[in-house]
Image (spheres, grey):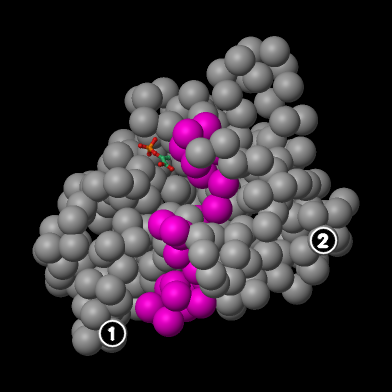
Amino acid sequence: MTNENRQPVMAGNWKMNVNHLEAIAYMNKMAFSLVDADYARTEVVIFPPFTDLRSVQTIVDADHLSITYGAQDISAHEAGAYTGEVSGSMLKKLKAKYALIGHSERRAHHNESDELVNAKVKAAIKSDLIPMIAVGETLDIRQSGNAIEHTLSQVTGALKDVRSNYVDESVIAYEPVWAIGTGEVATPQDAQDMSLAIREKISKLYNQEVADKVRILYGGSVKAGNVKTIMEQPDVDGALVGGAALDPDEFLRIIRWPDQP
Ligand code: PEP
């Protein structure tokens, strides 16, 4: 992380964990622990389940916290007969900043295609939410030597017909599927190689200025013990953290990555 134009991001994805009462306790702990220097260095983002968003918003608003938050998914539709879906405008009303789109668990368990991911990216932008787009290869694809090609095609698919002024504030999270929740971490060099390849792809799809602004995160079994070497890579601008973000103390250590071993 060397580019001073890109503020590092540490994002915690709670997945289907933490009820709204537990969310209040978690947020209070963050509010109590984080200081101005933490916020100045790193953007802290929480992705709670939909049912917790109102509780998170209430604490962030009441205590004027600089923590940002988003939804773990978003409907591709604006409104209407889509039982179970949550629209971008509903999320915006809760003052969400981000929508996490294309997480590998949604691609795998809900058959989300690149086309649907692209539609959700556009839905987020339409509601003035910033898309955080997750991409990454399975173990089979990595072993066949096609990890970069596959991941870049997901990037291209997600950004189809998206204008450059929306892309430069978007966030791409490179999450090798084989590293998510498994304890297996990509090497810092793997994270760097893929992040650079993604940046170069965005430069080709748009231009170098856009590529220099896009923040690219690594995700996959990030913990306090491995975050620092990952963050030392010049094209890695932060981390998307699942399991380790469920423990606020561990997530705080990750947010304070320069102090870690
Ligand atoms: C994730 O859910 O995006 C993730 C990276 O999970 P974990 O940190 O548990 O591997």
Which three-letter amino acid code belongs to the residue tagged 2? Asp
Whether the residue carrying mark 1 lies under 8 Å from ligand 1 is answered with no
Give the residue displayed 20% in from the left and 67% down from the top.
Answer: 27
Vertical placement of 13 versus 40: above or below?
above
Could you say whether the residue bearing mark 2 is in a helix, strand or loop? loop
* Residue at the spot of label 2: 161
Q: Position of residue 223 (x, y in %)?
A: 33, 39
- Viewer can see residue 253: no
Callout 2: 10 Å neighbours few (<14), some, many (20+)?
Answer: few
Looking at the rendered structure, the kind of residue marked 1 is: Asp
Is 114 situated above or below 9?
A: above
Observer-nearest of 76 and 199: 76
Taking depth in this image into account, of 71 and 183 the one nearest to the observer is 71
| Quadrant position of residue 205 | bottom right
Residue 119 x %, y %: 68, 57
Q: Where does the image place residue 218, in percent across and percent down from the top left?
A: 52, 43
Q: Which residues lie in the magenta part?
A: 83-109
The quadrant where ligand 1 appears is top left
Does the segment drawn in magenta span residue 98? yes
Let me know if residue 161 appears in the view.
yes
Query: On screen, 195 above or below 36?
Result: above
Instruction: Residue 61: give its label.
Output: 1
